[in-house]
């Protein structure tokens, strides 16, 4: 005999009318050419549809491979490389909540909203935060960072490799990480939009913590992120005066799953399988080839957009390749143009947090000539339809001819 279900639905809480995803999603999928998430390769999409047990030998084999391939992508030998269930911000918060506690001193190099997030997180766990504000549109200055470290007696310095929000590239990252190491200060680097799109050799540059998300440079799905800790950083975590206040983000508990194959929480298995495929494709392509593909693709995009008659947000020296900011001509409103790009031309690009600019991504699968050109074309046509004069023919000529030049141009990111 089954149990008698004595269920009294509350009046007016009936199931809503059924709406299928087909009703919600655009009839033609839009090409994701914004600041993330980015299109995923078919292998990643297929893996993301699979669910397996989160514990046991199959999952252990997957996580071992994810760690091994990640070591190549991060260019590190560290044992302490972990996945994180959550957005890139969760990986950033894992770095902060494990390395910082009340009384610890943190210097946050703030180029924009993403790099500034480290300070917001550190303040919440009681750190003494000092912010080095970098002039909008330019890269961090190692001299200023060193001065702030010394003036405040920093324990940790945080910074971003590419500030997605305003498309600035911190090209002195290596120098800053090395001076921090000399001063015995830990570095935490946000490489969310840049990892695997440009060089960031963690061990060689002496970086202590590198964080990245799934949905940008790696071209996987959002929701599973990666973090790598140096031995020096791990040492600090093991010798903390008290346990981390954040149970899910406790690196020592996370290592129980990622290293010792025990239970911490149920890992997002589908996302981990997707990440496995994304990493496998990066390892197959190899980093030098991938860096070159990104550098070339972004340069073609930048040159085509300029040939159309538009200006870029950041000057060549400090310009990020992974996300390109394009200034709207006088009178054009970025949001109206973005709307038109999406609805009339099937291409999603991004706004720029209040600046009258559009950001086009150049991460992973976005860096394929057909995708990049589709974004340039959609931008040009949308501007033209809105009554602005742009030279699309010239843009195409430049785009096509620059595909053939193998050497990095003025704004290559040191690839
Ligand atoms: C997107 C991004 C983040 C935040 O990633 P979420 O997955 O949205 O948390 C942080 N830093 C940089 C540089 C980014 O581009």
Image (spheres, rainbow, N blue to C red):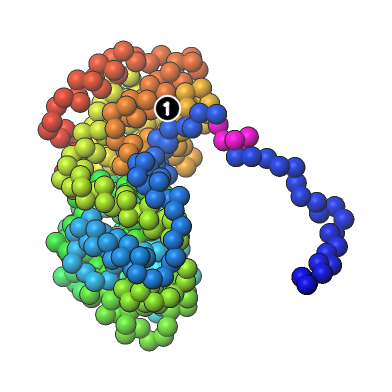
Q: Position of residue 64 (x, y in %)?
A: 28, 66
Quadrant where the image shows the N terminus: bottom right
Q: Residue furthest front?
A: 1
Residue name at image x 32 percent, y 62 percent: 62
Q: Residue furthest left?
A: 407
Horizontal side of 352 relative to 6 (left or right) equals left
Residue name at image x 24 percent, y 39 percent: 294
- Quickly name the residue at label 1: 328
Quarter where residue 228 is shown: bottom left
Foreground residue, 298 or 254?
A: 254
Quarter where residue 207 is shown: bottom left
Magenta residues (range)? 22-26
Horizontal side of 262 relative to 147 (left or right) equals right
Residue name at image x 19 percent, y 20 percent: 401
Quadrant where the image shows the C terminus: top left
Q: Is residue 343 above or below residue 157?
A: above
Q: Position of residue 197 (x, y in %)?
A: 25, 45
Foreground residue, 319 or 403?
A: 403
> Magenta segment, principal secondary structure?
helix
Mark 1: C-beta under 8 Å from nearest atom of ligand 1: no
Residue name at image x 41 percent, y 85 percent: 242
**Residue 360 visible to an observer of this rendering:** yes
Q: Is residue 109 above or below residue 35?
A: below
**Residue 363 visible to an observer of this rendering:** no
Q: How many marks on residues?
A: 1
Q: Position of residue 394 (x, y in %)?
A: 28, 14
Q: Is residue 404 above or below residue 391?
A: below
Residue 271 is a magenta residue: no
């Amino acid at each position: 005999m089954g149990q008698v279900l004595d269920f009294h639905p509350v009046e007016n809480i009936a199931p809503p009318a059924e709406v299928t995803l087909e009703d919600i999603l655009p009839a033609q999928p839009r090409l994701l050419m914004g600041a993330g998430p980015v299109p995923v390769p078919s292998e990643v999409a297929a893996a993301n549809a699979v669910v397996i047990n989160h514990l046991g030998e199959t999952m252990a084999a997957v996580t071992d491979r994810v760690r091994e391939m990640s070591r190549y992508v991060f260019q590190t030998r560290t044992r302490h490389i972990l996945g994180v269930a959550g957005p890139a911000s969760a990986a950033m918060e894992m770095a902060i909540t494990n390395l910082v506690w009340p009384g610890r001193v943190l210097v946050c190099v703030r180029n924009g909203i993403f790099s500034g997030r480290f300070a917001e997180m550190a303040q919440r766990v009681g750190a003494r935060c000092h912010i080095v504000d970098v002039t909008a549109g330019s890269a961090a200055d190692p001299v200023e960072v060193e001065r702030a470290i010394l003036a405040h007696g920093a324990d940790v310095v945080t910074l971003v490799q590419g500030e997605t929000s305003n498309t600035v590239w911190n090209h002195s990252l290596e120098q800053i990480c090395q001076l921090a190491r000399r001063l015995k200060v830990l570095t935490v680097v946000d490489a969310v939009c840049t990892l695997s799109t440009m060089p960031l050799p963690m061990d060689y540059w002496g970086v202590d913590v590198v964080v990245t998300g799934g949905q940008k440079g790696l071209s996987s799905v959002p929701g599973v992120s990666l973090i790598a800790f140096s031995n020096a950083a791990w040492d600090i975590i093991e010798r903390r005066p008290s346990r981390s206040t954040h149970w899910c983000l406790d690196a020592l508990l996370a290592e129980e799953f990622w290293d010792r194959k025990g239970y911490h929480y149920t890992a997002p298995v589908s996302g981990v399988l997707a990440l496995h495929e994304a990493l496998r494709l990066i390892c197959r392509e190899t980093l030098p080839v991938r860096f070159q593909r990104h550098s070339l693709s972004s340069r073609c995009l930048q040159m085509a957009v300029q040939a159309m008659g538009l200006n870029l947000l950041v000057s060549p020296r400090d310009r990020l390749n992974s996300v390109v900011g394009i200034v709207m001509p006088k009178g054009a409103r970025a949001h109206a143009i973005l709307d038109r790009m999406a609805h009339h031309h099937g291409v999603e690009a991004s706004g720029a947090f209040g600046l009258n600019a559009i950001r086009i991504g150049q991460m992973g699968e976005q860096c394929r000539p057909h995708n990049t050109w589709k974004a340039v074309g959609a931008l040009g046509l949308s501007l033209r339809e809105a009554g602005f004069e742009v030279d699309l023919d010239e843009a195409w000529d430049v785009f096509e001819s620059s595909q053939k030049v193998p050497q990095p141009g003025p704004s290559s990111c040191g690839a």
